[in-house]
Amino acid sequence: MFVKSNKEPEQPVTQPQQPQPVAAPQATGAQQPKRTGLRNGTPSIISADLIVRGALFSAGDVQIDGRVDGDIRAGGLIVGEKAIIVGDVYAEEIVVRGRVEGGISARKVSLSSTCHVEGNILHEALAVEIGAYFEGNCRHSDNPLANAPENVAAIERRPPAPGTPSRPAAASAPAPAPKPAAVG
């Protein structure tokens, strides 16, 4: 069955070993890959050709590239370079690259070199790039969102701040016509 051979075994020809590719570790629920941007998920986007009149509320992230005439409450907010916001802004984190005419209340505020802000800023952390335009007062607060509205209804019920352009009114019945004065 087994036969012993007198012949010496041939030495195999060895070639240089090439490194084997290492598989990338799989992301698990505990290990999320780092991502750039504000928070998690895809933001809601107001595109450059869109004009919104009224209050916006989002628990997630919002990116504004168009125009918003009204207050905004969002988890995270990016104001694009061509964006215009006329109203107050409330967010956990906000990056302003465009124009904001109104107050900003946020935990983390970042004013880019292309921004134009006219209004007061209430913040926990503030970063301002060289070239940013800011006219107003800024004040540090441990809880800048303490007076932030909780939903759209709360935003629409708020009276406009002094010196703020009038906000569009919510849909309501037209005001009655004035009665003529009696001549007598």
Image (cartoon, grey):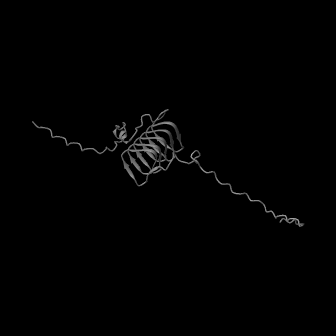
Q: Position of residue 151 (x, y in %)?
A: 39, 40
Q: Position of residue 130 (x, y in %)?
A: 54, 43
Q: Quadrant of the N terminus?
A: bottom right
Task: Using the image, determine if residue 144 lies above or below residue 26.
Answer: above
13 displayed left or right of 112: right
47 displayed left or right of 181: right
Task: Using the image, determine if residue 24 lies above or below residue 176.
Answer: below
Q: Nearer the viewer, residue 8 or 93?
A: 8
Q: Position of residue 4 (x, y in %)?
A: 87, 65
Question: Extreme top residue here?
Answer: 142
Task: Using the image, determine if residue 27 lies above or below residue 149.
Answer: below
Q: Nearer the viewer, residue 57 or 113?
A: 57
Q: Quadrant of the C terminus?
A: top left
Task: Using the image, determine if residue 92 lies above or below residue 45.
Answer: above
Q: Residue at x 14, y 38 (%)?
A: 181
Q: Quadrant of residue 154?
A: top left
Question: Extreme front residue here?
Answer: 1
Q: Tell how many labels.
A: 0
Q: Quadrant of residue 13?
A: bottom right
Q: Nearer the viewer, residue 48 or 32?
A: 32
Q: Residue at x 51, y 46 (%)?
A: 40
Question: Extreme right residue here?
Answer: 6
